[in-house]
Every structure is written in structure tokens, then in C-alpha cells.
Amino acid sequence: MPPSRNKADEVLRQAREALWAGLDYAPGAIYVTDVSGVLLYCNRKVEELTGYKKEELIGTPLLTSGLLAETQEARTRILQASGATGETSGPDEMRLTRKDGSTLWVEINTTHVTQPGGDVTIGFVRDVSARKQTERALEAERDRFRGYLHITGSAIVLLDAEGRVGLVNHRACAILGYPQKEILGKSWFDSFIPERFRDELRDVFDRQMRGEAETLENLENPVATSYGEERLIAWRTTVLREGGKTVGVLCSGEDVTESRRAQEQLELSRRRIEHMLKGMIVVIERMTEMKDAYTSGHQQRVAELSTAIARQLGLPEETCVSLVDMAARVHDIGKIAVPAEILTRPGKLRDVEVALIKAHPLVGYEILKSADLPYPVAEAVLQHHERLDGSGYPQGLSGYGILPEAQILVVADVVETMSSHRPYRASLGIEAALEEISRGSGTLYDSDVVAACLELFRRQGFTFSD
């Protein structure tokens, strides 16, 4: 070989050795292999990682050394020694077996270098065992979390930022009627929401993704199932964030299809019963009218005033107001047991006749009790002549012993009776009636009921219908 060539080779060898000597003090683990994967060089950090001395490693084929515990394919990826200078491979993660038999996870990046003395591959190794341990712990936590999701009785669906299904539990699969693999990755709105609800629910989803609603509760909407039936789900949705950025929405839902159907049936039954009760009240009113037309008209007007007072007091419409109206319309039904000539006779009545009239609340109670009307209709009828001071009849109740519904009837009954014409006397006028309840407010009559009644007549212009 010409001397000039020998001199050049020597210069290259010295330059390479100088470079490798400098790499000994690099902060990371570095190695060099030839095109066949034989280790030509490794620095001190490689010794620390592997537990081997340089002398034990250099000259060893990396593919068959037993250092890398991954598959042949994984080991081969880091030994690529073809292509242009600067071509890189990695990062590749794999287990490295140390001299003492222990293993650790490393990340390897390689760079191909073309040089006159032969192409080489330079590898940069980083210990990632701590990170892998953390990842395994996180994965174990995720597995436990997934396990919890699958055993919960709620349907769980995770939507990504595009509205695609990223996670679905067993309960949600059972409701939808699809296996998990046929749900994951699909558009939730296009695949599982009935078309008539899609735009509305997309708008709700978009608002959450924009941060306008962190959590939404009791969001009910139907889902389309594989067997053609829609199921109504009550959802609770929560925005998910990573690094301050909204990345999706977690939805937890309960199938309320059957409960809503049951509620609808109950409401239908309630309306039917209410219709039957109203029909029964009409029948009782007609019975009273056949006995005494004045009494029938009196009950209707007392019902008008009683319901107006109940509303003025702010009582619930579907319960208290409707029951007060019902009781008022039949409160004098007991007078069918009193002869008509006694009810219409002018002048002073005999004691026995007065006793017969005072018995009408009790008679009415017995009739209505047998009709099985809702509480406290019959009880309010029984008490509509009681007074706060105990001077009323038939039981002589006082104070809180008188039902609130009955206290409304008491005031409405007095006002209507005094202000209306009767066969045995002319009307005393509405002002006389209002003066009467004003004088008795707090002693004979409930003060709140009196105040409500006065407000209706004197400020709101209430009048009885003809």
C-alpha cells in the first residue's frame, strides 16, 4: 500500500479514537456499531447501564449478545446501517438485560454515518425505566377504572372532540344492542341518536366543547338501538380537559324508558280518576239542586270565592286549590236530609228544626265519606261551620283543629250567604258580609283567609258570577 494511503488511514484512526475518547465523558450512553451490528465502541455510560466493561462489549455482535430482550424485529430496527448520512431511526423502546441478570427499559435512537473507513451506526441510549414504571402504574389504574366502568349500572360513553366514541362500557353496549367494537370510533350523533334530535344535541355538545357548560344534568334524549327501539336515557355530561384544553365529554346515563312510561300511565290514570271525581261532584250538585235550587247556586258561588281565596294565598293549584273547589261544590250536600219547608221558611225556627239544620255538615260528611273522595274533601265539608273560638258546629272545634281548607270554606260561605238573596230574607249586601268577616278576623275566622278575601273584593274587583 502506498505510504500516503497508510498515513491517511492513520490520521483517520487517530481522529476516530480522539472522538471516542471525548464521547467517554458525554452525559448520555453512546455506542457505535459497524454495518453488521458489531460493537466498535461504547462510552462509560454504556458500562454503567449494562454492568459490563468496554472490553467485554466491544467486538460483540449486538444482535446476538443477549443485551436486548425484545424481538428480532425490534433489535434489527436499531441496527439499520444503510442509506444516506444522517438517516435516523427511533426512538425505539426495549428491555436491556444487564450483566447481573436484572433488566431495565431503554430508549434508543440511531444515526447512520458514512465515512471512508466504513459506514457505522451511532446509537444514543436513555434509561426510561422510571417512566415505564409510571406508565405501567397508570395503565393499571386505567384498567381498574375500565373495570369500574363495566360493573357500574350506568351507561358510560366518552366522546372525543369530534363527537366520536372513544370509550363505551358494557351497560351502554347492552342498551344500544351493539358489541363494543361496533360502537368505538363511530360518530355518536350520526350513528346512535335519532335524526330528529341530532341538531339539538350537537349544539349542546358544541357548547360544552366551547366551555359554555362544564356539567349538564338530567339531559334526557332517546338513543337508537340495533333492534329498532328507541330508549330514553337521562344523561349527566362532564367536560374533560388535558393541559387546559377541552378534549372531550364524559357521559353517564340511566335508562329511564320504563319509569317514564310508568309515569305516563300514572298521569293518565290520575286524569281518568280526576275526570270520574268531577263527574261524581256534578252528580252530587244535581242532587242538591233537585232538593233546593238556592242551595245549588250557593255552592257554585262559594266554590268560585273559595278557589279565588286559595289562589290568592298561593296554595298549590293541582292539590289544595282543586280540593278546596271540590269541597266547596258539595259542602251543603247534607241539606238533602232537611225538609225544604224548613230551609225556606222565614221567621224563627223551633229548636228541633235548628238542630236538624246544624246536623247537615255531619250528614254531608257521611255521604261523601262513602263516596271515597280524596282527603280532605269530606273532612272540610264536616268543618265548614266551625269557628276559631270554638263556637261553631257540629264538633265545636277551635284554632288549629280546623283544617285550612275548611277555614277557607267558612269565610267564603259566610260572605256568599250574607250577600245573596234567600227565600226567607233579602240580601244583606256584600259590604255587610265583608264587615262581618273583618270584625271576626282572628277570633271567628282565620286572619290570612279574611285578608285574602278582602283583597279580592276591595282591590281586585272580584264579583260572583250569575
Image (cartoon, helix red, strand yellow):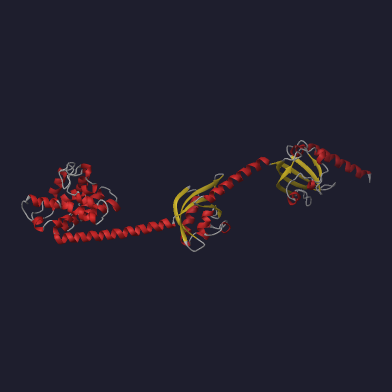
Can residue 302 be seen here? no
Relative to 277, residue 137 above or below: above
The reply, left or right, for residue 411 in relation to residue 133 is left
Furthest residue toward bottom:
228
Q: Of residues 369 and 348, which is closer to you in this image?
A: 369
List x then y, in percent, for residue 188.
52, 57
- Residue 39, quarter of the rendered image: top right
Quarter of the rendering occupied by the C terminus = bottom left
Relative to 163, residue 444 above or below: above
Furthest residue toward right:
2
Q: Of residues 251 and 28, which is closer to you in this image?
A: 251
List x then y, in percent, for residue 100.
75, 38
Number of marks present in the image shown: 0
The reply, left or right, for residue 419 in relation to residue 325 is left
List x then y, in percent, for residue 304.
21, 54
List x then y, in percent, for residue 289.
16, 60
The reply, left or right, for residue 249 in relation to residue 86 is left
Furthest residue toward left:
347
Can residue 89 be seen here? yes
Q: Of residues 206 and 75, which is closer to you in this image?
A: 75
